[in-house]
């Protein structure tokens, strides 16, 4: 437990350093944050463009898709803020600067996670939250206590699931140094996928995203419960409340992958 | 004749430079394929809801998606080609060395970027496209002429893409930092090129505007040329006009920049 505290402390210190450094160029910071907001909003503009031509997609209306979108983007945004710099790991291994992190007296995961910590990533979270709030106000739902409670649970569990994907991706980069883009397929690809209803995708595809890489628990399954829609793959009713458990399991697997990756690390020596 | 050999060598260098990173290329192929699959499913649902949206049938919409994935890095739609190098060289002051070279700055980087584009097309673009053709119904022509017409449209698209990004890069002579402008390149590129949504299907006036902008020369034109939805000569004229305008603007801005340039760094 003290090791965890140590990691959080190291993360906090390093992240704080990057925040201070980015605040040196204040205008640049404001502009990039605004740009980040615009950039991440383009996905939603794409959805709006689609809905300028149709009234529903895969049987889901705009407010319902906005609900999926808001959940996916907000939870991904949190994971991206916390661990989004993981994709520089490959570059660090290539140029040898990863070795420096290994000899420092702080957990490597905390160091690499906080590396180049970028406050501008709040742009994505802000944009996702705005869409989510709009969706919550406009979906036609008979709200019960369970449904209300499930919304924050979804965001937090979703963020944890995405964090696990980031960590597993980082572990993969130790094996395949130049392949940081593979991680993008699962992280950015994952959040894009979850912006659309499961009814749009092929059955085998949905199965893969439910049982192999359990992204379906970020929003598809619990959101189906909230919106009173049939579950993907006819999952049992309680599956909507499984996201916290799925998140813990993913976290454990991600941690194991990271340990395995770190254990097999060989310096490039350059 | 000698100077053409120089630029050919620069282009070959650009090609080889990107060809060096094999694992990164494979990773990119994988990512583009995954994104292609996700987009294809959403487009199929969309065209299911509204057949003939934007004048395409379902097979054409699928073709559009895979051509988009094929051209994503080829045309550096979200940036990341020569402009990244130019910005970095302006920022560090190394651009002074480039200006001393007995070669034209704009042509040098154009050649280098074309080399990169050609590699990305072959190394990174073809496989996702073939994957798409194997697993999804696509509207592909069977005659050689259409494919040759596509290739010409692609070459013009590469020049237009470079023209836009080179202008953006030159602005760093005044801005000193490339972060903001690179974001602008990304946002306009992603939105206006039609990678998010085909420009043909954009509604109303917005559609008229985006279809007239230079980004339309990147994905929309080649796609329509390939699928026989546009007259190749008309498409080429549109692309070539923008290519000339952008390169001329780049030339003007370049001479303005080099006249008043204060090189950064020590």
Image: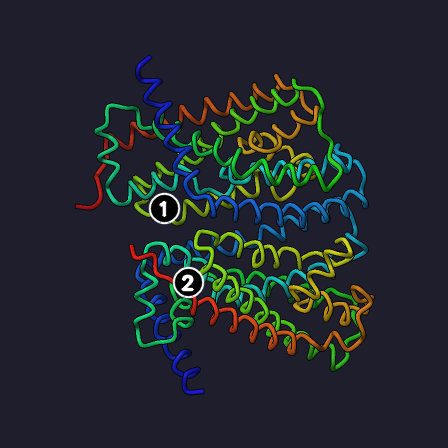
Q: Which mark is residue A118?
A: 2
Q: Residues within 10 Å of mark 2 (few under 14, many from 20)?
A: many
Q: Is residue B139 visible?
A: yes
Q: Which residue in the rendered view is the most extreme toward the bottom?
A: A1
Coloring scheme of the render?
rainbow
Query: On what subunit does the disc labeled 1 rest?
Result: B
Q: Which mark is residue A33?
A: none
Kindly identify which residue carries mark 1. Answer: B178
Q: Quadrant of residue B102?
A: top left
Give me the C-alpha separation between circle 1 and circle 2.
17 Å
Q: Quadrant of residue B170?
A: top left
Vertical side of B218 occupied by A94: above or below: below
- In-image side of B235 versus B227 (left or right): left
Q: Secondary structure at mark 2?
A: loop
Q: Looking at the picture, how far across and down is residue B167, in whole percent?
A: 40, 34
Q: Which residue corresponds to the image point at 56% horizontal and 21% vertical from the top-left?
A: B152
Q: Which residue corresponds to the image point at 57% horizontal and 20% vertical from the top-left?
A: B236
Q: Nearer the viewer, residue A7 or A177?
A: A177
Q: Nearer the viewer, residue A44 or A1?
A: A1
Q: Which residue corresponds to the image point at 28% horizontal and 24% vertical from the top-left?
A: B103
How many marks are shown on the rendered structure? 2
């Amino acid at each position: 437990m003290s090791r965890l505290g140590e990691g959080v402390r190291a993360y906090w210190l390093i992240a704080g350093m990057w925040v201070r450094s980015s605040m040196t160029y204040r205008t640049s910071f404001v502009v990039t944050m605004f740009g980040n907001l615009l950039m991440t909003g383009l996905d939603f503009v794409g959805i709006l463009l689609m809905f300028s031509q149709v009234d529903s997609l895969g049987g889901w209306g705009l407010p319902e898709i906005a609900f999926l979108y808001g959940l996916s983007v907000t939870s991904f945004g949190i994971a991206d803020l916390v661990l989004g710099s993981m994709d520089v790991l490959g570059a660090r291994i290539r140029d040898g600067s990863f070795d420096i992190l290994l000899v420092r007296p702080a957990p490597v995961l905390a160091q690499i996670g906080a590396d180049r910590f970028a406050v501008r990533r709040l742009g994505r979270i802000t944009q996702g939250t705005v869409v989510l709030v709009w969706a919550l106000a406009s979906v036609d739902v008979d709200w019960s206590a369970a449904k209300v409670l499930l919304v924050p649970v979804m965001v937090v569990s979703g963020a944890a699931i995405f964090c696990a994907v980031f960590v597993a991706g980082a572990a993969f980069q130790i094996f395949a140094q130049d392949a940081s883009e593979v991680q993008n397929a699962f992280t950015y690809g994952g959040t894009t996928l979850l912006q659309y209803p499961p009814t749009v995708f092929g059955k085998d595809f949905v199965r893969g995203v439910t049982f192999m890489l359990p992204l379906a628990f970020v929003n598809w399954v619990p959101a189906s419960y909230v919106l009173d829609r049939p579950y993907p793959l006819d999952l049992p009713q309680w599956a909507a409340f499984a996201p916290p458990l799925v998140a813990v399991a993913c976290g454990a697997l991600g941690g194991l992958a990271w340990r395995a990756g770190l254990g097999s690390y060989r310096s490039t020596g350059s | 004749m000698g100077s053409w050999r120089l630029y050919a060598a620069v282009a070959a260098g650009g090609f080889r430079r990107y060809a060096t990173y094999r694992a990164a290329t494979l990773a990119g192929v994988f990512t583009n394929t995954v994104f292609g699959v996700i987009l294809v499913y959403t487009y199929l649902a969309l065209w299911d809801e509204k057949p003939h949206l934007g004048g395409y049938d379902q097979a054409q919409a699928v073709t559009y998606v895979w051509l988009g994935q094929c051209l994503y890095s080829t045309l550096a739609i979200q940036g990341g080609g020569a402009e990244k190098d130019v910005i970095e060289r302006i920022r560090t002051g190394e651009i002074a060395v480039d200006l001393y070279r007995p070669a034209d700055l704009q042509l040098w980087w154009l050649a280098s970027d074309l080399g990169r584009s050609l590699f990305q097309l072959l190394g990174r673009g073809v496989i996702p496209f073939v994957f798409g053709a194997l697993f999804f119904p696509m509207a592909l022509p069977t005659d050689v002429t259409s494919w040759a017409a596509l290739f010409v449209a692609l070459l013009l698209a590469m020049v237009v893409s470079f023209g836009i990004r080179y202008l953006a890069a030159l602005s760093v002579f005044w801005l000193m930092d490339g972060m903001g402008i690179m974001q602008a390149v990304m946002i306009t590129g992603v939105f206006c090129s039609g990678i998010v949504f085909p420009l043909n299907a954009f509604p109303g006036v917005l559609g008229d505007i985006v279809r007239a902008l230079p980004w339309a020369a990147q994905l929309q034109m080649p796609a329509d040329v390939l699928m026989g939805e546009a007259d190749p000569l008309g498409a080429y004229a549109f692309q070539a006009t923008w290519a000339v305008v952008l390169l001329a603007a780049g030339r003007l801005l370049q001479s303005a920049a080099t006249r008043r340039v204060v090189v950064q760094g020590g």
